[in-house]
Amino acid sequence: MNKRKIVVTRKIPEQALERLKAHGEIYMWDYEELPMPYEILSEEIKDAAGLYTNVGDRIDKALLDQAPNLKAISTMAVGFDNINVKEAVRRGIAVGHTPGILTETTADLTFALLMAAARRVVEGSDYVRQGRWKSWGPMLLTGQDIYGATIGIIGMGRIGEGVARRAAGFNMNILYHNRNRRPEMEENLNASYCSLDELLTRSDFVVLLAPGSAETGYIMGEKQFKRMKRSAVFINSSRGTNVDETALFEALKSKEIWAAGLDVFEEEPVSTSHPLLTLPNVTVLPHIGSASVATRTKMALIAAENLIAGIENKELPFEVKI
Ligand code: DGY
């Protein structure tokens, strides 16, 4: 019997690859950092039963048109905004993702970014390395306090909740805005639900954790940045497509807001000539929210199990439901 073809769009951890090999013939794009070109993916997908993908691939209708035998798409991520899920489901293709596993790791990174942006950690490190440190200065590299400040979390899903738990440890006043109210968060962490407008005006830290979606458009644009305090720090570890980057640049440059910490960008990888990267009050990371060895290994394995179940017509351990 011919083995089913599985296309894997990046070099993945060995354990996950071994699991897949037991269930199909693997075509793997053997690079970890270099994205698989869309044209090559369009060719390889033609006779594939399974597609093992990630946030860096565009899985659109045109690609699915090339894949008459595809039974399952499995992304090594919780977010699936890069996949046309509606179109996949319409064709009977199961779509899997990795929710839950990366919650704490991503909350850690989000909080690290918040602290780094507030206390100018990267700027301070560069200052030392570049030999600019001449003496202790009373107001040298002064930042914003975190302990006891007000944090506003936009998108109170699993990761938002993880960030709120960390914020509670820093005695922060927690505000949140979400599709649905979370009474247990209000009870357990003393979090207060409020409108987006109120959250923006009251928060010292605005942390964006809403899922990305082509349909919702920008959550943060010119109007929203203008509502924030001049001393406020904006953090985004959700999706770059949630933010109007031109408006963010203007807000930071004109000191309408104090700083930003960004793990995600509208276009990734972000160009080194992007205006945001010219600002000292912007701390940037290359979309590494879930990047701990343990979490990425688990994500890779769960994505493998999703894919195997999908090509074998079984229920996926973690299926995207829309
Ligand atoms: C996700 O899982 O959606 C992250 O953005 C990548 O780890």
Image (cartoon, rainbow, N blue to C red):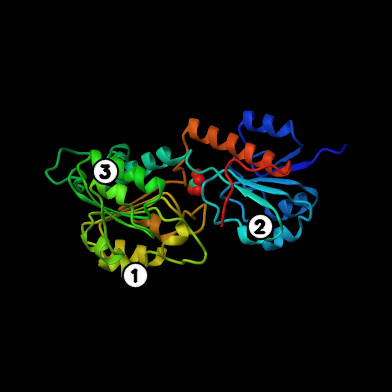
**For the residue with label 3, is its CB less than 8 Å from the closest atom of ligand 1?**
no
**Considering the numbered disc 3 on the image, is that residue within a helix, a strand or a loop?**
helix
Q: Which residue is mark 1?
A: 222
Q: Above or below — where is 7 with respect to 215?
A: above
Q: Which residue is mark 3?
A: 188
* Mark earlier in primary sequence (2, 1): 2
Amino acid found under the numbered disc labelled 1: Glu
Q: Residue at x 46, y 46 (%)?
A: 286
Q: Above or below — where is 244 with respect to 318?
A: below
**For the residue with label 1, is its CB less than 8 Å from the closest atom of ligand 1?**
no
Question: 4 or 207, which lies in front?
Answer: 4
Amino acid found under the numbered disc labelled 2: Val
In three-dimensional space, the C-alpha distance between marks 3 and 2, rounded to whole angstroms, equals 38 Å
Cβ–Cβ below 8 Å for labels 2 and 1?
no
Question: 263 or 34, which lies in front?
Answer: 263
Q: Which residue is mark 2?
A: 89
**Quadrant housing the C terminus:** bottom right
- Between disc 3 and disc 2, the foreground one is 3
- Between disc 2 and disc 1, the foreground one is 2
In three-dimensional space, the C-alpha distance between marks 3 and 1, rounded to whole angstroms, equals 34 Å
- Disc 2 crowd rating (10 Å Cα; few below 14, some 14-19, many 20+) is some
**Considering the numbered disc 2 on the image, is that residue within a helix, a strand or a loop?**
helix
* Mark earlier in primary sequence (3, 1): 3
Q: Is residue 6 left or right of residue 118?
A: right
Q: Residue at x 38, y 55 (%)?
A: 155
Q: Exactly how many numbered labels are in the figure?
A: 3
Q: Above or below — where is 131 with respect to 139?
A: above
Residue at the bottom extreme of this rendering: 223
**Considering the numbered disc 1 on the image, is that residue within a helix, a strand or a loop?**
helix
